[in-house]
Structures are given as structure tokens and as C-alpha cells.
Amino acid sequence: MEATTLIKEHGYVKQTVDPSVNLVAEIERLKKEKNAVILGHYYITGDLQDISDFLGDSLALSRQAQKTEADMIIFLGVHFMAETAKILNPSKKVIIPDLNAGCSLAESAPADKFAAFKAQYPGHKVISYINCTAEIKALSDVICTSSNAELIVDSFDRNQKLIFAPDKNLGNYINSKTGREMVLWDGACTVHEKYSLEKILELKEEHPDAKFIAHPECEQPLLLVADFVGSTTALLKYSQESDAQKFIVATESGILHQMQKNSPDKIFIPAPSIDSTCGCNDCEFMKLNSMEKLYLCLLHEQPEVILSEVLMEKARQPILRMLEISKKLKR
Ligand code: 13P
Ligand code: SF4
């Protein structure tokens, strides 16, 4: 069956790969042949992290997408991240191994409902977390990530009324840090909302020498007991620079690969979830990426991220505004 038909049916090229194919060598070969670059997020599996040309958090990946000279971008992450890369590179081909790699947070804000919500607050500017669809970005004044949210909020005059979407937990955290009262859209990430505060407190007692570190998408009671709160890059940096030898980590499990790689002698414990049988620390969408799908995606140059010019034009301005303001950040 043709690749295009398979993508229509499954969202990815569903083909059996001959087990004798050396996937790493073939991916490297195809990448060179097509002048393609692989951008990977910290939540993908270790083998994919290791084959990425550039690995980072949402902000770093957007910056990298903005400056790449490659002809083709393969995004190993989720759909909104690949969309952002496409919006910043409308003339380049942006491909993603599996179109089903969505995001529960992005899904929690449908554009029509958000437009109606926004209409209830005249005079408000909209700051949207990058974990949203291109349609929501087009309805926003500026985008932010977990790395620069505070800086973006602070770029507005204190009298300016603000809406923050779609993550209520990050919005709440930034409200508490800045003393603002931004209106929050009621969205959340299913991975970061499943940590058990009770079990984390027990684990902290068991390991009094461990630092508890958390992503700001987690709920407030959990953030209040954290020794450090930050984006994936900030958590990684903290784990490297801290004198502590043990860390309880409340964010998607993929980051542990990089933490362990950068600090081989330190101990990293994934924060427990409410349900110990669910594998809730894994983002089901990020984990749809695999070496086989990456290989097939590069081979067929599909599935491709396609957006209308009009939508890209509208969504680009708030992303560029974020990148401009973020120049003030050291990294
Ligand atoms: P970062 O901004 O830390 O990369 O987080 C992205 C994300 O999807 C968190 O769930
Ligand atoms: Fe979206 Fe949550 Fe997965 Fe991040 S971890 S990509 S916010 S579903």
C-alpha cells in the first residue's frame, strides 16, 4: 500500500521494517542525503534522544527551528511542536513520525470555545503556553513556554489585564510568582496532574537527602513542597549543578535519560503517580515516536505537517514576539 494511503488510515507509515536494516546507519544516511535535521524533545525515548541532532525543551527547540539551515525538519516530539517549527519555516518540509502524537493540554483548548471565552474579557491580552494548537496561537498576543513564562508575563504593564491559556497549573504558578491575577483557561496535562502528593511526601521521608524537583504543569500543592520548579531544561541543569546526589523527579520520565547521562553517579527517582499500574509518568503521545517510525518517515518524507498560509501568518506573530522577548534570557 502507498505511504499516503497508510498515513490516511493510521496517521503514520505502517510498514514492516526488515529486521536486518541497521536503523541508526540508515537514518544517518537518509538525513545527510536529504539535508535534514532531527529536533528532539527530552520526553522521547533514550534511543531517539541519542540520534537527535538537537535536543531541548520547547523554547530551545523553537529557537533551533528558527535558525536551522537544513532543508527538512524531522520533529521528534508532539504535533504542536512540529507545527511551531513549520510556522517558523513555512517554505521548509516539516515531518513528524506519527500524526497521532497530540497533547492532552493542547486538546483541552478547542479554538471555538477559546474564542468565545476570550470574547468575555474585552481589554485583556492573551498569553498562550506553546502547548496549544496553531489556531489558539493565532488567537493570542504572545506565546510562552515554561522556560520564559515569567519573563513574558512581566513584559506587560502591571495594569494590563491578561488571559493565560491553556494550562491552569502553569498560569496559577506564574500568578503566585508575579502577584498578577491573570484569568486562567481551565486546561491541564494528564501526565503532570497524575502525581500523588501523598506518595511523594512518603518518598521524601524515605529519602531525606533527595531534592524534589517538579515541572510547573504539576498541581499547586505539589509545587509548594518542591525544592525546585522549572522547565525540563531548568530541571536538567539543576540536577547537574546541585550538590545533592539524589532527586525525585516530577515530570515525564524521558528526561531521566538525559539526567542520568549528564550525572552518571547521581540517583534519579521518578515521582510516583496516583495509580502505580498506569505508567502515568510516560506521555503516551511522546512515546508514539519510535526508531522504526522515524526511519520510515525520513524514507517517505511523510507524514508532513501542513497548515494554511493564513493560519501560519496569524500564528507566527505571537511566536516571534516570544522569541524576541526571550533574547533577554541567558540561554
Ligand atoms: P518544556 O517547556 O519544559 O519543554 O515542557 C513541554 C511539555 O510538553 C511539558 O509537558
Ligand atoms: Fe502534552 Fe503533557 Fe505530553 Fe507535555 S507531557 S506533551 S503537556 S500531554
Image (cartoon, grey):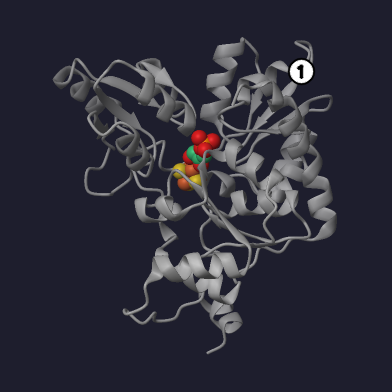
Q: Look at the image and tell me whether residue 11 can be seen.
A: no
Dividing the picture into quadrants, the one containing residue 146 is top right
Q: Position of residue 163 (x, y in %)?
A: 70, 27
Which of the pair 293/135 is nearer the observer? 293
Q: Is residue 212 left or right of residue 296?
A: left
Compared to residue 232, the image places residue 17 above or below, namely: below
Dividing the picture into quadrants, the one containing residue 220 is top left
Q: Position of residue 156 (x, y in %)?
A: 76, 18
Q: Is residue 271 left or right of residue 283?
A: left
Q: Which residue is mark 1?
A: 156
Neighbor class of circle 1 (other Cα within 10 Å; few <14, some 14-19, many 20+) is few
Q: Position of residue 268 (x, y in %)?
A: 26, 32
Badge 1 element: loop
Q: Residue furthest bottom?
A: 1
Pick the quarter of the image with the C terminus: top right
Q: Is residue 208 left or right of residue 216?
A: left
Q: Position of residue 237 (x, y in %)?
A: 43, 26
Instruction: Please name the residue shown 51% across and 58% down the image.
Output: 101
